[in-house]
Amino acid sequence: MYTRKIGKSLKSSARNIVSIGALVVLTGCTSLLKTAALIDVHESFDEQNYTETLAHIRKAEYLSDLDPLLLAELIYIKARSFEAMGQEDESIALYSHLVSVYKSSQYSSLAKIRLK
């Protein structure tokens, strides 16, 4: 009887360890996905492929739990892309959003410069 209780307890502990391990792996994968998405955004922007940049930004925005600073960076690059494509209304709206919502970020300061 005592042996069965120990066996059940060990099985339960093993399941918990596996669950925690899976969570750690998934969390790491999410972090890698965010990093890869940001790299794709910057590479396409640097290559002046703004349509592709916007597509990469859309993918990055779907990742959960984006850090506010990362989100502000994506919005800034999106605004720069629209500006480069001649879509002034979209870029102004995004720059204004950065200034009002992300007041203390470096991207707010950069957006203020672009709005002048």
Image: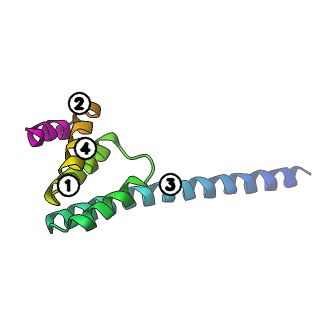
Q: Residues within 10 Å of mark 3 (few under 14, many from 20)?
A: few
Q: Which residue is mark 2?
A: 103
Compared to residue 40, the image places residue 112 above or below, namely: above
Q: Position of residue 64 (x, y in %)?
A: 45, 50
Q: Is residue 8 left or right of residue 35?
A: right
Q: Position of residue 14 (x, y in %)?
A: 68, 57
Q: Quadrant of residue 36?
A: bottom left
Q: CA distance from mark 3 to mark 2?
A: 33 Å
- Mark carried by residue 94: 4
- Please report contact status of discs 1 and 3: CB closer than 8 Å, yes or no: no
Q: Residue at x 17, y 53 (%)?
A: 80
Q: Is residue 66 magenta?
A: no
Q: CA distance from mark 1 to mark 4?
A: 11 Å
Q: Which residue is mark 1?
A: 87
Q: Earlier in the sequence, mark 1 or mark 4?
A: 1
Q: CA distance from mark 1 to mark 3?
A: 42 Å
Q: Nearer the viewer, mark 4 or mark 2?
A: 4
Disc 1 element: loop
- Mark carried by residue 24: 3
Q: Nearer the viewer, mark 2 or mark 1?
A: 1
